Image: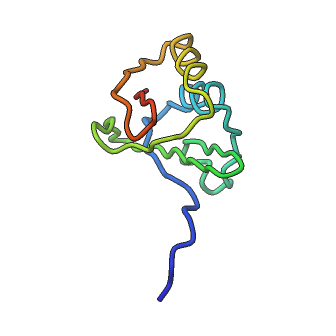
Amino acid sequence: MTRITGIDHVQLAMPAGGEELARGFYRDVLGLRERPKPPHLAKRGGCWFESDHVRIHLGVDPEFRAATKAHPALLVQELAPVVDACAARGFRVTHDEPLEGFDRVYV
């Protein structure tokens, strides 16, 4: 039986033309590096971000609608600086009740 050994990346949908907003969040707030997309995929738009252990791919969906339930849950070293950076850049942050020892926010 084949066993999964990890997740290569998470693919999220984004609206056309949303690359700069995505960079403002994933690169500038979360500190992920932008990774160039292969040329045959770059023409579709979107952008890819990564750190040593996390890869997030944002792909353009022409019929994009923001998800109301599905989401990745990202761990950060310190939550307060991320919340402050989001607020400073105009991203809406919603606080939620802690879960199993984790403080939680939605951006």
Q: Residue at x 69, y 40 (%)?
A: 34
Q: Residue at x 44, y 44 (%)?
A: 72
x, y (%) of residue 56?
56, 47
x, y (%) of residue 107?
43, 26
x, y (%) of residue 33?
71, 39
Q: Is residue 25 above or below residue 8?
A: above
Q: Is residue 71 above or below residue 25?
A: below
Residue furthest left as drawn: 68
Q: Residue at x 60, y 28 (%)?
A: 78
x, y (%) of residue 18?
50, 30
Which color scheme did the rendering employ for the protein?
rainbow
Q: Is residue 44 above or below residue 88?
A: below
| Left-right relation of 59 to 32 | left
Residue 49 in which image quadrant = top right
Q: Tell how many labels.
A: 0
Residue 82 in which image quadrant = top right
Residue furthest front as drawn: 101
